[in-house]
Image (tube, grey):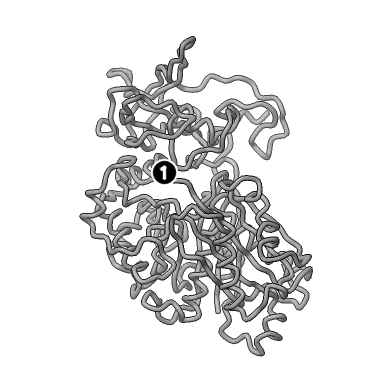
Amino acid sequence: MCTTIVFPPREGACPNPECDSDTLEPAELSRRGRVWSYTENHYAPPPPYVAADPFEPYALAAVELDDDGLVVLGQVARGVSAADLHVGMAMQLEVDTLYRDDDHEYLVYVWAPAAPGAET
Amino acid sequence: MTGASGERDVAILGVGMHPWGKWGRDFTEYGMVAARAALDDAGLAWRDIQYVAGADTIRNGYPGFIAGATFAQKLGWTGVRVSSSYAACASGAQALHQARAQILAGYCDVALVIGADTTPKGFFAPVGGERRTDPDWLRFHLLGATNPVYFALYARRRMDVYGATAEDFARVKVKNSRHGFENPNARFRKENTVDDVVNSPVVADPLRLLDICATSDGAAAMIVSSMDYARHALGSIDGLPRVKAVSTVTPRYPQTVLELPDFATDSSAAVPPPDRSFKDSIAGSAYDEAGIGPTDLSLAEVYDLSTALELDWYENIGLCAEGDAEALLRSGDTEIGGRIPVNPSGGLACFGEAIPAQAIAQVCEVTWQLRGEAGARQVAGATVGITANQGLFGHGSSVIVTN
């Protein structure tokens, strides 16, 4: 096994072409990282996104995880706008509601500015 | 690859387009107009065509998936052999690659390469159904990550890392709107100012409406042949535009730049990144095949899905070092009349994107430029042109044409 990391999780072959393993084991990724880039979306996406009504702009950040050598895109925690972000800024993972229906609340990861004193 | 006569080039005998716009008609109607224009340009009849390489669209139901046959039937069945290529925005280059391979392998002498699209209003959305293993579905569902969101990530990174400004991005639009102003095939023919762009509504910060290309209807077609066929048909091939290279590369692992439609990159923790990034390898492979480099170019047609993305391409196709694209733009070198004009057609800024036609349209523009037939947007003395484009799901596309 080559010990490379893949996200989102997948089954089957390792993505590394130099590796013949079909065994992919769960691995815990860093919950912290630094902003690679960011944006703020001002137009409601089409389905299958479940947009808030009325639509509220939201920020997204592509964050380079501290120890895993990869960048993960996510929405940014509510209340944080693009003006609050910059490339290289320390971020941490949180969990928030993606949307609700009659029976369930669906969760998704979001990026939030790292708590003060918890610099990565 | 070497053809039957020992040659590696294929001749461009004719090119044609249906103008870009937004009418919502059957895409094969646009394709017919483009095909007939290319046939007229080549001085050939549809009956003469031995192979049809169709570039596919996913937006028109099942017939769109089998584009080569769809166009052959529309033009009238002749028993012609066909292929159909789907590579998102790179479909047209894949179709050209198919036609070239058939010609160089000696299976046919002359081929039609064609792509056409009709597009819905608004953002592109993933195809229907609930597909929880499809990254294209997931990035919309989980993250609301539209295409402009990705364009904006690249744009913002240029601002924070290289000092790009909103005015720099606007200047790309101003340049391209000036280039395309008299292009009869362009959809948007209005000269924009920096103020127009920076005062248009924010779509995905820092990009505004006039920074982002529209979705369009349109069609483009080429007639390509072996050099022998061209010699016999024309008597002389002096000055005839010819395809020197077609790059259809995919990424090497690990792909470390976030690309549509993925919402994570590969990891470089255990495996170091390749020497050449995917986007650098797209044109790089074409230069390698043609045996030329960026300093040999007369012009370039690049995929300006956003104004800021055109600046990324300056670096990816080797016009300047990483981080120097804003300086190159500000110098005026990428305007018609400058050292290396980029998007003399007006680019996507003036056309909007008609996906399966777009990579073919880029080559049509280079062909007109090399023949000296580009009218008000002519690049003086053009002899070498490159196109560059990238399709969703790791499809690179770059074509080099010389005369």
Which of B275/B401 is in front?
A: B401
Count of all numbered marks drawn on residues in the image = 1
Residue B66 in the image: state x and y as whole percent.
Answer: 68, 52
Q: Quadrant of the C terminus of chain A?
A: top left
Compared with residue B234, is residue B208 higher up or lower down, i.e. above or below? above
The residue to which callout 1 is attached is B122
Q: Can residue B20 be seen in this view?
A: yes
Residue at the spot x=45%, y=20% of the render? A108
Q: What element carries label 1?
A: loop
**Badge 1, how many Cα within 10 Å: few under 14, some, many 20+?**
few
Residue type, numbered disc 1: Gly
Q: Quadrant of the N terminus of chain A?
A: top right
Q: Report whether B341 appears left or right of B239.
A: left
Q: Report whether A4 appears left or right of B296.
A: right
Residue B285 in the image: state x and y as whole percent.
Answer: 58, 60
Residue B64 in the image: state x and y as whole percent.
Answer: 62, 50
Residue A10 in the image: state x and y as whole percent.
Answer: 62, 27
Q: Report whether A22 appears left or right of A35.
A: right
Compared with residue A19, is residue B191 higher up or lower down, i.e. above or below? below
Residue at the spot x=52%, y=74% of the render? B367
Compared with residue B94, is residue B46 higher up or lower down, i.e. above or below? below
Which of B2/B28 is in front?
A: B28
- Give the quadrant of residue B291: bottom right
Which of B375/B341 is in front?
A: B375
User: Which residue is farthest bottom?
Assistant: B235
